[in-house]
Image: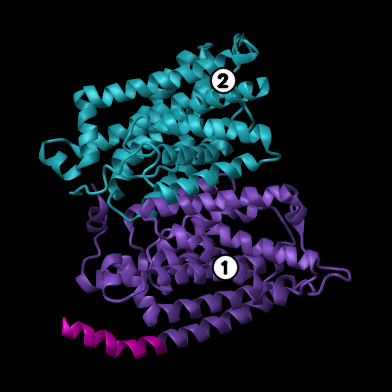
Chain colours: A purple, B cyan
Amino acid sequence: MPTKASFSIASKSSRTLVASVFGVIALAMALALRSQLPGGELRAVSTIFMFIALSQAWNIIGGFTGYASFGQVVFFGMGGYFAAVVMLKYHFSFWLALPLSGCFAALFAILIGQPLLKLKGHYFAIATLGVAEGMREVVINIADLTGGGAGISVPIAGKFAKTEYLGDGGFYLLFLALAIFSLVIGTVVSRNKFGYGLRAIHQNEDAAAAVGINTVRSKVMAYALSAFMTGIVGASYVFQQVTIFPERLFDVEITVLMIMMVVIGGSGTVIGPLLGALSLQFVSEYLREHFTNVHTFILAGIIILAVILIPQGAVNYLREGIRTKDFSLLTNIRRYRL
Amino acid sequence: MDTFLQVTAYGLLQGGLLALVAVGFSLVWGIMNIVNLSHGAFVILGAYIAWEMQAWTGLDPFLGMFVSAAVLFCLGYVIQRYLINLIVNGPVFITLLLTFGINMALIQAMNLVFTADFRSIQTSYGSNSFGIGEVRIPLVRLLAFLLAIVITLLLVAFVKRTRTGISIMATGMDRGAARLMGIKARHVYALTFAISAALAGMAGTMIATIETFDPSKAGKFTLMAFVVAVLGGLGNMYGALVGGLLIGLVQSWAGQYLSGTWVNAIAFLVLIIVLIFRPNGLVGKAFYAARVEI
């Protein structure tokens, strides 16, 4: 359909313009918000930024490439523990530990990605889940290095603390920066040749290989990039929390939240995971505050309904709806129904 | 040597229990290509139902497990028919998310209804054991082990010999052809899931007689079911039994001869190695690899 193609090319530069205008406004609002909010709410908004970064990271391997990494939290945990160990034992400054922890997570991804990315569908999902659960056990068992199940604390005061604790306002800025970084990476990947290669792999891996995409290298690179982004978020989270435990840092619920945000928003898009992270984290915080007893229950209900009603995500649902003029949820359910 | 024999016996008995936990999980995965993340919650729910039955009516857990199985059968049927069937053809992470959502809801419901304190089912014969040579065999564990084997054999007989069982297998092999032959795939899927949930309920009851349980243990059982199902392979009814016994032995030996909780890490290491080198499992075959989805 040539008309459609020319339409989308013509609108691309205007879309970029609109997106950057909105981006600048949102950034200005986020910065202005920093001086207005009390400490507790600053932390809540920081968590939203954190999940924006995490969902963008998952989107690269899960959304673009189509490999459902159900153990993504392993990179969060590995990055976090790497930062904690080098800061505590080797007195690294946080600003040095931050990129190194990302590299460490990426290296680990390259290592396990070679064999694991040969697996498909559920097998990949379960293998990555196995890696995450296994690594948690490993971290618990090498207590000399990691503190084991009793946890480990990052130095934030005294002569070994190379970087001063950032405080609520500082972490707000740090997580905002991570969110922006992840959005930039997401946008770049979404538009360059590498990203189109990943999409091709998602749609048909054999066909992608046939048109000259080095599928193995692309997949491993996507996995490593995703791991890097997750790893630096993990390191920042560790510095914010000061004392960390394996149970929290390798919590499968973090993975599920990442995936949920991507899926609700719309996987394979940049704006989707952003909207998903914003809305889901906001709803989750609201429910926690107002329906403390049953907030998990309601959240589970939202997950179940969202997955059944709009399995392709809000952004993709709207796009398809606008194109086909059919917003019926029933059509939507029929898509994957037996 | 005596220690070794004792540890081996314990491993085999524990393995039977793991097999019982995993056999339904493996069935659902093999037939419908759905990884049911709420399987562990079914196990725990079965344990709670049997506990309540014993508390209210004094029913023995070995009879109470049939009540658990019946309740979970109905629950499983409804969940598959009205929730999971709606997204059966979706991408992997959609089905994973849906079953995880069901898992969250079930666990939270159990926390609210039963509170989260540790429970276990006490019986008058619960601490009985007998010796074979130097090896002590606890009675309840032996009963659970035998039950696991009997149930696996019954399941195989059901699937191979009855009309309903054959229609389940047919749907698993080629859903399109099965539907053309007049099999109601929606009903068969719901039935398969219901059987899986009922088996999980029985396994939960057995576990409750042996160790303490609470809703937070659900995830552990789901993961164990994963490991066992993958190890045994799908598409072979004996797969779960083989996988369960093997993991039981490995865990038992590792628990005896390694320090700390390396035993859990070993289970996942085995999982990953098997996935990489023999993704169809030790005795399985990829029988739905080329099936037609209609």
A264 displayed left or right of B45: left
The residue sitting at 21% across, 47% down in the picture is: B291
Prevailing secondary structure class for the magenta stretch in the rendered image: helix
Q: Which residue is mark 2?
A: B209
Q: Nearer the viewer, residue A200 or B65?
A: A200
Q: Is residue A12 magenta?
A: yes
**Residue B72 image position (x, y, % from top left):** 40, 28
Q: Is residue A304 visible?
A: no
Give yes or no for contact between labels 2 and 1 (Cβ–Cβ under 8 Å): no
Q: Is residue A66 visible?
A: yes
Q: Quadrant of residue B120?
A: top right
Residue range in magenta is A1-17
Kind of element beneath mark 2: helix
B285 displayed left or right of A290: left
The residue sitting at 36% across, 44% down in the picture is: B280
Q: Nearer the viewer, residue B130 or B180?
A: B130
Q: Which residue is mark 1?
A: A107
